[in-house]
Amino acid sequence: MSDAIQHECGVAFVRLLKPLSYYYEKYNSPLWGLFKLYLLMEKQHNRGQDGAGVAAVKLNVEPGYPYIFREREMKRNPLDRIFRKLFAQYEAMVKTGVIHPEFTPTVKQNFDYGAEIYLGHLRYGTSGGYNISACHPYFRRSNWPTKNLVLAGNFNITNNGELNKRLVNHGQHPIFSTDTQTLLEEIGFYLDQEHDAIYRKLRDEGRHGADIAQGISDQLNLVEIIRNAARPWDGGYALIGAIGNGDAFALRDPSGIRPLFYFANDEVVAFASERAPLMTVFDLEFTDIQEAKPGCVYVIKKTGEFSTGEYHEPTPATPCSFERIYFSRGNDQEIYRERKRLGALLGEQILREINHDLDHSVFSFIPNTAEIGYYGLLESLRLRRRLEVRDAILDAAQSGTLTADRLDSLVMRGWPRTDKVAHKDIKLRTFISQESDRNLLASHVYDITYGTIRPDDTLVCVDDSIVRGTTLKNSVIKILARLNPKKILIASTAPQIRYPDCYGIDMSELGKFIAFQAAVALLQEHGMEALLKEVYQDCVAQTGQPTAALQNHVRRIYDRFTTQQISDKISQLTTPQLDHWHGEVKIIFQTIENLRAALPNHGGDWYFTGNYPTPGGYRVLNQAYINYYEKSAQRSY
């Protein structure tokens, strides 16, 4: 991706179903579960580098001793810092004789993370600030084990303000910080209610002390708790959590927007945001991993009993398409095939743009996530050429015109030429605060392979998506132009990104989208800028309307023009003014139809179509446009 965007947190969960001694005897380590958590998080580090956090819950700890532990880190390389610290503590205890790994009770008694339940979280900040208090897991404390709650997730809630008012109406005094804190208190409120109701019932039956605590633990109904808490939630979410008594849970939003996968056997239950890490870490086959069902909560009781319950009636499934295009690692076999398909479906548009002149075209990609789409494009072009050559040879043979020269021409010419033209050289450092300085640094994010392009060549570069277009203009095209091609063609495997996201991706400022800028520029060129005010007035007018009445008025700005007109304007806006190169820049995008053909099971395409899966999406869009028109820098959710 040429534009760097913040996005998508990642979760990892491991619940051991056997005593620690079992894992020492079978795997030669009482920390087998902690190692698995580390590997799951490391295999998902693409999902979060702003911070990381882990939590552990021990089962059957005697009163007077702690049983829930948490470690969070926001400094550079947070995952490495956390686990380096934990393993160093463990090794020091082994070295001094405090812990004897073969005698696993010493591990559980003395090492905080000698536990049975592990939660891990990788953070990409989209809201809530960049400090340790915004880092998951969150922890709600109590002296009652069944009121302690640890929570982490990959999500954004669109109606956070409404939920905070709900907490106030419950009589609480919530801290208005993040949606994670809000969900923690929402679940915690109903956890308290469930706990207290069971306590009163057991007390009235004459039960006391440890017996009453055991009864509460046995009867705690997490499905009902989540059902009550989640009823008003609007957003996309995948959550993992644990209760102090040893119960644990994982759940996915009713629309399936955010991804969640799991597997379970007689040793362990594990959840993760992506399928491939579970396969790799636990040495499993594709069919061993299950996708969590939307609207369902998965519960692991303290006893190890694993069950599923529906906490919300599923709505039409709209899993996030951007997960497949860009966010998730491409080593998942389904995602790999889909990204190749997205690249292949660009073939017709590209051939038209280069006038089918493959002899004077060089194909490459923008590192690094566009590489798979590039392979798919080449595969389709080569297949097309093989069929053309086969048919031409057969026709020439049948007509008696097949000569050595004709055969050489067919076999040696007309094939796609490829080169590794662009290289990602450095990361843009966020400590550069001045915009002009950041732009100067951004212009050197990429480097090129000199001598690969001829002056009469068209350079075709595949990109997975184009959001703001700033890196494309300030870095990519400038550096590619130094190769002096006749034309630079950037082909995006994603359609034009037209609408903000509110479900976990930092794309909330409508005015920064290059597609929106292009549409506004076209309105101005055609004397139709009055539409901008009309849309603003309509957005303001529906601000307080019921959810069911909300409409996507922003769509009218795009509907005035064809997709091709907007693409052409994007090409103009992203063309830098250069003294040394005066060639043509052309940007083309995947069509919505081809997107859906490549991703038939992931219909969450609101970024491109404006068809939001929840009512909150339209509220966010409404506010995003108001912010744009009023030149406000505030967030739209």
Image (cartoon, helix red, strand yellow):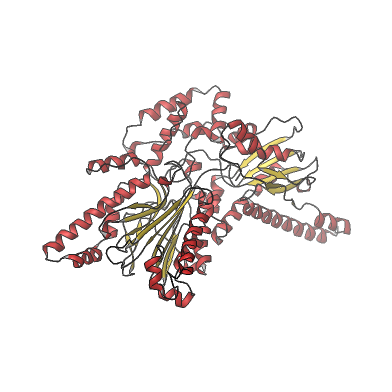
Quadrant position of residue 203:
bottom left
Is residue 84 left or right of 449 when viewed as pictured? left
- Residue that appears at 35% across and 52% down: 139
**How far from the left and from the top, in percent, is residue 397?**
82, 61
Give the camera-side residue of 546 and 7. 7
150 to 548, vertically: above or below: below
**How far from the left and from the top, in percent, is residue 570?**
61, 34
Is residue 610 left or right of 231 when viewed as pictured? right
The answer to whether residue 228 shows anywhere in this view is yes
Give the camera-side residue of 614 and 200. 200
**How far from the left and from the top, in percent, is residue 296?**
35, 58
The answer to whether residue 274 shows anywhere in this view is no
**How far from the left and from the top, in percent, is residue 507?**
49, 40
Question: In which quadrant will I find the C terminus?
Answer: top left
Residue extending furthest right? 404
Residue extending furthest bottom? 25
Quadrant position of residue 306:
bottom left
- Residue that appears at 35% across and 31% down: 542
Quadrant position of residue 204:
bottom left
402 to 470, vertically: above or below: below
